[in-house]
Amino acid sequence: EAGVTQFPSHSVIEKGQTVTLRCDPISGHDNLYWYRRVMGKEIKFLLHFVKESKQDESGMPNNRFLAERTGGTYSTLKVQPAELEDSGVYFCASSTRARSAEAFFGQGTRLTVV
Amino acid sequence: GNSVTQMEGPVTLSEEAFLTINCTYTATGYPSLFWYVQYPGEGLQLLLKATKADDKGSNKGFEATYRKETTSFHLEKGSVQVSDSAVYFCALTRANQAGTALIFGKGTTLSVSS
């Protein structure tokens, strides 16, 4: 069974550009989470989907970030326009129940904004 | 608010050395505590967990005991191997509207040499 897959693994963009990160959860997992680790800091929760609905987006840093999960399958996280402080590793995770601690994580997307 | 504090890394050890990575937490209520590990090029994996005071989580030779009186969950291993080289994250869960989200520490990089 495939695990959580994230695309791309690395992305380098210029400040002001747009980037879209994608996450394919494990098939059948209704719960999908996004987390972010800025260099040298904690991994921080961004948001939680249950199917296509946003259940908790309290961790989204600002309105330059837009997460979607159309059809309740894969999810995208768009950053527009990107700023230098958005650099970091973005993790996606999925689970059957609404518990992050039971979630399986992807390998992350390393985003570098220059 | 809820938070996790880990010892600063990197930690550099020789093979078969004893490992301790300190973790303390601040939380309301009675959180569950976790250690996650990220091996190079891979996603986060749950290493072990403890859900109540005095519980001991263990896996792959690693252990951690939930100490409510000292609000700690230190990770230990008696004899590390080169293959243990990774980044280790201490985490706890908090309750939100839909379920639980993880709160992580900053991570500790472990490098084991032969």
Image (tube, rainbow, N blue to C red):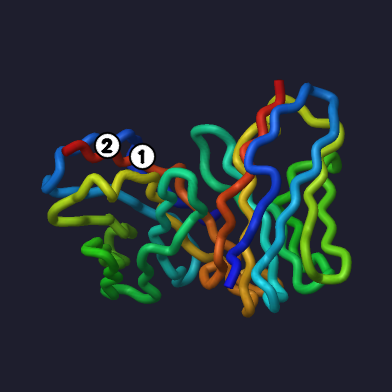
Which residue is pictured at 47% across the width and 62% down the height? Answer: B92
Element under disc 2:
strand
Report which residue position mark 1 lands on: B109
Report which residue position mark 2 lands on: B11
Q: Residues within 10 Å of mark 2 (few under 14, many from 20)?
A: some
Residue A79 image offset from top left, x and y in percent: 81, 39
Which residue is pictured at 83% across the width and 69% down the height? Answer: A53
Q: Amino acid at mark 2?
A: Val
Identify the mark nearer the N-term, 1 or 2: 2
- Above or below: residue B104 compared with residue A15: below
Q: Chain of mark 2?
A: B
Is B113 placed left or right of A2 in the picture? left
Q: CA distance from mark 1 to mark 2?
A: 6 Å
Is A29 placed left or right of A108 in the picture? right
Q: Chain of mark 1?
A: B
Q: Based on the displayed image, in which of its 4 quarters is residue B97 positioned?
A: bottom right
- Above or below: residue B94 compared with residue A96: above
